[in-house]
Image (cartoon, grey):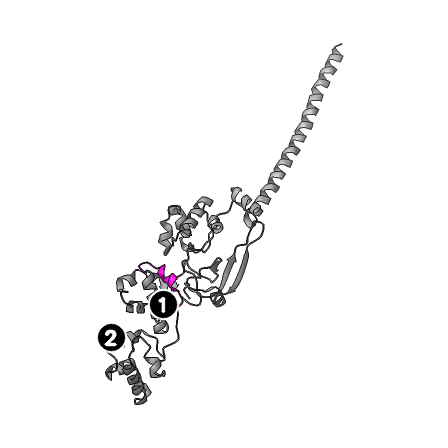
Amino acid sequence: MAAKKNNGTSEGRHNPSGVFKAGAVSLAFLIIGYQAALFVHRAAVEKIASNRDHPDTVYVIDRALAAEILEGPGVAGRNGPLPEYPACAADISGQSAGEGAGGSTRGPVIVHKPSSHSSQAQAIYHDSGRRKVESFRFNPNTVSVEDLIRLGFSEKQAMSIDNYRAKGGRFRRKGDFAKSFVVADSVFRRLEPFIVIPRIDINKADSAAFDSLPGVGGWTAAKMVEYRRMLHGYSCPEQLMEIYRFDKERFDGLCDLISCSPVPPFRLWSLPADSLRTHPHIRSWQTARAIVFYREHNPRDKWTVDGLLSAGILTEDQTQKLRRCRLE
């Protein structure tokens, strides 16, 4: 009886142990399967969140070609072949060695063009909660809502910036972007080196672009375009102060926002009198004919603006203004 009792106890001990081992193995496989499923799901979500359903397109092109293709009205022609970088939908970055925050004027240019994505991919991207915060060159006046989110802003913050622009708001300087209530100081410090606000080229801008400058209204903007036509192009930004009511105070308030691309020289020493008289610093038939007469009766080495002043053909004011002009 004792032996049977001992055998029964021994069998009772071994049976639960076998069940426990089988359960432990099953649980282990279940955990491994669950972790594998999580890993696959996470990888899929992160892939969609990073690329969405169509990867973005990246071009590497010559800087001079980039300037020719992407340059447009109101763009500073976004310091060299590609100053300030043009305002366009693409993100443009310099690739030259030792390039600083202001961009390089040599070497190739990377043009990043965001692709369009399906609503399902966008939803996964915004809801994944693991999106990567990026830093890249951008113009706060033209950057898309999607790229603002890539830069680290929430969708609500990005929409707030977009609504400000839609109502006519404009970021003229980097500091203006910092003043936005949705841009935290820490975020601005990270993004400041990547902010690119193209200067307005006074030889290419239209009146609407001029009107966006501080201190410039519709009347002055129209005068800026008209005076450029009369001058056959601005030779330097300071010529804006020759416009009626465009004083030094107004010029100082916007001079850091403009640039002046080269223009063909005015042919003071070869144009006929009827063409010379259209220039705002010559004006009269009498002065135009006197310049032609001076050219015909003086050697070429005497053909200077100061020579015209000494001959009594130009006044001191006319001479000073013509010195600013690019002459042949």
Determine the secondary structure under disc 1: helix
Residue 64, position as x, y percentages in the image:
48, 68
Residue located beneath label 1 in the image: 225
- Density class for disc 2 (Cα within 10 Å; few <14, some 14-19, many ≥20) is few
| Residue name at image x 33 percent, y 74 percent | 325
Quadrant of the rendering where the C terminus is positioned: bottom left
The extreme top residue here reads 1
Of the two numbered discs 2 and 1 on the same chain, state the one appearing first in sequence: 1
| Numbered tag placed on residue 317 in the rendering | 2
Range drawn in magenta: 203-215
In this rendering, is residue 210 above or below 307? above
Q: Is residue 279 left or right of residue 103?
A: left
From what the image shows, is residue 126 above or below residue 236?
above
User: Residue 210 colored magenta?
Assistant: yes
Q: Quadrant of residue 285?
A: bottom left
Residue 126 belongs to magenta span: no
The secondary element bearing badge 2 is classed as: helix
Between 321 and 43, the one lying in front of the other is 321
In the image, taking residue 241 as reference, residue 119 lies left or right, namely right
Q: Main secondary structure of the magenta part?
A: loop
Of the two numbered discs 2 and 1 in the rendering, the one whose residue sits closer to the viewer: 1
Can you tell which mark lies on residue 92? none
Quarter of the image where one finds residue 231: bottom left
Asked if residue 268 can be seen in this view, the reply is no
Mark pair 2, 1: CA separation:
22 Å
- What residue type is disc 2 on? Asp
